[in-house]
Amino acid sequence: MKAVILAAGEGTRLWPFTYSEPKPMIPIANKPILQYVVEALVKQGVRDIVLVVGYKRERIQSHFGDGKHFGARIEYAFQTKQVGKAGTGYALSMAKNHVKGEFLVLPGDNIIESATLAEIAKLKGNALLVTESPTPSKYGVVQMTGDSVANIIEKPEMQISNTISTGIYKFNESIFQYIEMANRAGQHRLTEAIQRLISMEHLGVVLTTGMWRDVVYPWDITGMNAEALLRVEQHLAGTIEKGAYINGPVWLGDGCVVRSGAYINGPVILGENCEVMPGACIFPATSIGNNVVIGPHAVITHSVLMDNCSLGAAAHVSHSVLGYGVKLGPNTSVSPAKARVEIEGEMKEIESVGSMIGEETDIGACSVVNGGLIIGPECKAAAGSRVWHNLPASAIIM
């Protein structure tokens, strides 16, 4: 059986982290989200994979190549234009000439266990994998009649059910005729094609209680990261000086240096060639990419720092995401708070969230970044700044 992974979208709701990177390549526990999907399929014995790519596709192709390094055989289908913000049906149609018979369809922005895929792969005929969610309004809510899908309602305003679509399907080739019908009507969501399918054919349901995580908004990255880190194993490479304290599952990459007096409490992962200075503290649910410098007495907890970041002495980062190359000066604080965040016209209430800081942003010493902010890429804030509102790309605070 082949699998088709939909990885062509731009992921605008995840800006600023999709500024130069497609959504499926956002790192979670130092691996692209898409890599978790590929690895789960391979572990389940599904090695023939079609990646539907579009936005920043060269980033995906350069990482995965022909799939050999991942134990897979990967081919690519190219989506050359975006059709609205949720053109998943249109994206799947790009794979039409790459599949025959039954095949799996998966989003490229979920983390899922291999065993969960087994539940849908063994079912005969068309099928949808569903799960229970405490926040169903973020997803397509599934209404069922017996063991069949009766309806899928996208992001209902009123709570109908907690049963949601994971976006993971098993189809046969008939799905393409329904996609074509929907596209002709100007409807490009896969769920719109499925409404036509369920009026003509049976679409079975598999309810999973296995691990399934997706990322919709920037602050979802830290939750997904924390989930992935629950599976991190102890691996201590590099140099750990006498007097450094490491507790719990910590993955320390090659070339890392942990100075005397530093404290790391796992689950934590650090990539290659990082330096953790004396007195620095890294607390659980934190991922740190390659070539990152953590200054003396800096504190990080429940956060994601991508490659090439640097934190000055006594900087503090909590429940936040720092994009590639972000620099925080000494005594700068990025701390969580209760926040109301607007994403594409939708207002989201978040009980506790830090800030989402885009790549190559430089925030000077002794600055404070309020919780719940979205800071664009390549911004600059002078020393002593108080950042209290969202910033567009390349903004300057003097």
Image (tube, rainbow, N blue to C red):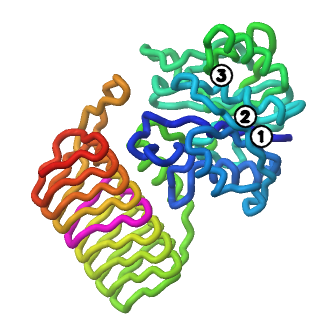
Q: Which residue is mark 1?
A: 3
Pointer 1 local density, CA inside 10 Å: few below 14, some 14–19, many at least 20 = many
Q: Amino acid at mark 2?
A: Val
Pointer 3 local density, CA inside 10 Å: few below 14, some 14–19, many at least 20 = many
Question: Does residue 170 appear to the left or right of 364 in the view shown?
Answer: right
Instruction: Give whichever of discs 3 and 2 has the lower sequence position.
Output: 2
Residue 164 found in image quarter? top right
Question: Does residue 301 appear to the left or right of 235 in the view shown?
Answer: left
Residue 385 seen anywhere in this rendered image of the structure: yes
> Dot 3 lies on which element?
helix
Q: Is residue 150 magenta?
A: no
Q: Which residue is mark 3?
A: 190
Pointer 2 local density, CA inside 10 Å: few below 14, some 14–19, many at least 20 = many
Distance of label 3 from label 2 (alpha carbons): 11 Å
Q: As rendered, which of 176 and 81 lies closer to the eye?
A: 81
Q: As rendered, which of 81 and 189 lies closer to the eye?
A: 81
Q: Amino acid at mark 1?
A: Ala
Q: Position of residue 206 (x, y in %)?
A: 71, 30
> Dot 2 lies on which element?
strand
Q: Which residue is mark 2?
A: 105
Tag 2 near tag 1, CB within 8 Å: yes
Tag 3 near tag 2, CB within 8 Å: yes
Q: Which residues are magenta?
A: 302-319
In percent of the image, x 53 and y 55: which residue is there?
Answer: 228
Considering every residue shown, the one lying at the far bottom of the view is 242
Q: Is residue 318 magenta?
A: yes
Residue 13 found in image quarter? top left
Q: Position of residue 252 (x, y in %)?
A: 49, 75
Q: Is residue 323 above or below residue 77?
A: below
Question: Does residue 170 appear to the left or right of 209 in the view shown?
Answer: right
